[in-house]
């Protein structure tokens, strides 16, 4: 988007700051997620208690509840697993009342069903009436709470207020990601932040709105503007931070001294949006990759490899069972080879042959050469379309995992023809090869299928976030979210 489309004439003067708020909550991102999870768990367990006390045979005296703590712990674990599958702690989803109620209600029903089917660790929910009470209470409690959150706690009075230093390309990108929608719901709206405006010394920006936000003043007034606009955080949206003027640096230190949080743009993107903005890093490698070489990190890498080898065994069994069905379906709809081999780039830039069930017509790229698959691609066979939606075509990659060329979770490996061009066009592209590529990854569950350089840049930002923040919890989130994609046939 060019300058003329992001900057519009303003009234000529900065808008007046808001009146002092009588009451404001200003919940941070981590606090919002904690609040949602704690109340969710309380609501689902309260529903179980209501069901238990509705029948004389399951109504325990309060003093005996601790002896059956496993019932409530099991319910909490199942709920959190379902919450990960349904992505219930994605703040923009939680802030959309209708979507949140519908999704959380579905998750509550699935939780009740799985709980009723779990042996030994759950109470004897022996009657249909008991299960019905549990289900109705769980769906009602969760839905009412999420409706309250979206209607009250996701409103502006409870959001963090942020001031952006820099109205250039970096600042505009941030405003667009957080605020604007281009024909579809913006995935970052509802992230718990309200941007009040910019601080910028460029006289051409004075009295203007840039990407929908007013330029309030220059850096000499940073502290006074922060106070007048009641901000909680100041975001430094300047790519080349080594070139910051001494006076601006001093103004930022004064804001820190006054108790304001000062955050750089890459750190804000990581914390709130779950990605690393490669175009706004400059050459700051410390921000890009803080290589984790501690004992915990190295131990987890060993554990991941052992887990891959353990999980690959049932994967090979499923592959063996799937081969006859795929072979027969392909023979009927598009005769040709069963498997498709394609060169990909893996860890350390090493190339390997990835295995897939063939989902396109034979020799699909004979005329075009290497190209991205596109929406409604006519090269995809009828059964191949189903395999792609269900991710069944990726199943043979368990052999690549067994060989050590891939892992179950990691950045998706790209073709060398695309890697060369993308590395030339996108900063830090090759840094995604620092870990083993995966069958699924953070970019795959956070962003739609990409078929352009712009899409590749955004997916790279998610991949680099994963490389930098690889943890067991992040891997579990990806695993559960991938399960949702497979069950809903949302692959492509």
Image: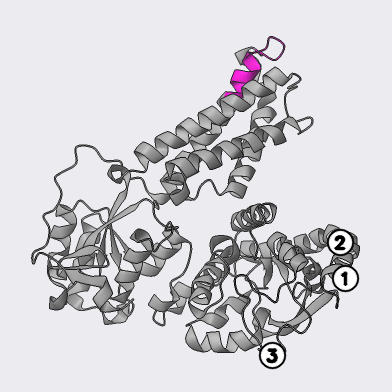
Q: Which residue is drawn at 49% across and 76% down?
A: 457
Front residue of 162 and 3: 3
Pointer 1 residue: 331
Mark 1–mark 3 CB contact (< 8 Å): no
**Label 2 or label 3, whichever comes before in sequence order:** 2
Q: How crowded is mark 3: few (under 14 residues within 10 Å), some or many (20 or more)?
A: few
Task: Judge whether residue 56 is colored magenta.
Answer: yes
Disc number lying in front (1 or 2): 1
Pointer 3 residue: 367
Q: Say which quarter of the image contains residue 388.
A: bottom right
Mark 2–mark 3 CB contact (< 8 Å): no
Task: Give residue 124's mark.
Answer: none
Front residue of 248 and 268: 268
Front residue of 472 and 17: 17
User: Distance from label 1 to label 2 (Cα)?
Assistant: 14 Å
Pointer 2 residue: 322
């Amino acid at each position: 988007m060019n300058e003329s489309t992001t900057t519009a004439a303003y009234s000529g003067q900065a808008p007046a700051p808001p009146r002092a708020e009588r009451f404001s909550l200003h919940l941070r991102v981590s606090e919002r997620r904690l609040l949602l999870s704690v109340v969710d768990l309380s609501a689902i367990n309260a529903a179980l208690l209501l069901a238990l006390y509705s029948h004389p045979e399951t109504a325990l005296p309060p003093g005996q509840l601790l002896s059956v703590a496993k019932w409530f712990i099991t319910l909490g674990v199942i709920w959190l697993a379902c919450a990960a599958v349904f992505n219930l702690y994605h703040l923009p989803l939680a802030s959309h009342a209708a979507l949140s109620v519908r999704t959380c209600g579905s998750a509550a029903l699935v939780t009740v069903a799985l709980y009723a089917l779990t042996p030994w660790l759950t109470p004897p929910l022996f009657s249909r009436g008991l299960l019905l009470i549990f289900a109705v209470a769980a769906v009602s409690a969760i839905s009412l709470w999420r409706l309250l959150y979206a209607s009250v706690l996701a409103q502006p009075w409870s959001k963090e207020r942020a001031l952006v230093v820099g109205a250039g390309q970096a600042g505009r990108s941030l405003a667009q990601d957080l605020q604007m929608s281009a024909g579809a719901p913006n995935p970052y709206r509802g992230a718990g932040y309200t941007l009040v405006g910019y601080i910028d010394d460029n006289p051409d920006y004075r009295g203007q709105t840039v990407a929908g936000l007013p330029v309030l003043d220059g850096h000499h007034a940073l502290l006074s503007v922060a106070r007048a606009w009641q901000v909680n955080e100041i975001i430094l949206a300047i790519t080349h931070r080594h070139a910051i003027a001494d006076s601006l640096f001093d103004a930022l230190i004064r804001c820190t001294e006054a108790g304001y949080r000062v955050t750089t743009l890459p750190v804000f993107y990581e914390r709130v949006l779950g990605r690393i903005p490669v175009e706004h890093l400059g050459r700051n490698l410390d921000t890009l990759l803080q290589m984790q070489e501690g004992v915990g990190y190295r131990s987890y890498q060993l554990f991941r490899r052992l887990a891959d080898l353990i999980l690959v065994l049932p994967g090979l069994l499923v592959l063996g069972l799937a081969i006859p069905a795929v072979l027969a379906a392909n023979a009927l709809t598009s005769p040709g080879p069963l498997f498709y081999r394609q060169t990909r780039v893996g860890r350390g830039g090493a190339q390997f042959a990835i295995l897939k069930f063939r989902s396109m017509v034979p020799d699909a790229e004979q005329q075009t050469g290497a190209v991205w698959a596109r929406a409604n691609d006519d090269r995809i066979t009828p059964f191949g379309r189903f395999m792609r939606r269900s991710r069944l075509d990726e199943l043979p990659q368990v052999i690549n995992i067994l060989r050590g060329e891939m892992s179950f979770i990691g950045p998706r490996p790209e073709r060398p023809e695309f890697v060369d061009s993308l590395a030339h066009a996108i900063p830090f592209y090759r840094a995604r090869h620092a870990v083993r590529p995966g069958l699924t990854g953070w970019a795959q569950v956070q962003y739609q299928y990409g078929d352009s350089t712009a899409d590749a840049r955004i997916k790279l930002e998610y991949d680099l976030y994963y490389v930098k923040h690889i943890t067991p919890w992040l891997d579990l989130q990806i695993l559960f979210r991938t399960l949702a994609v497979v069950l809903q046939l949302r692959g492509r």
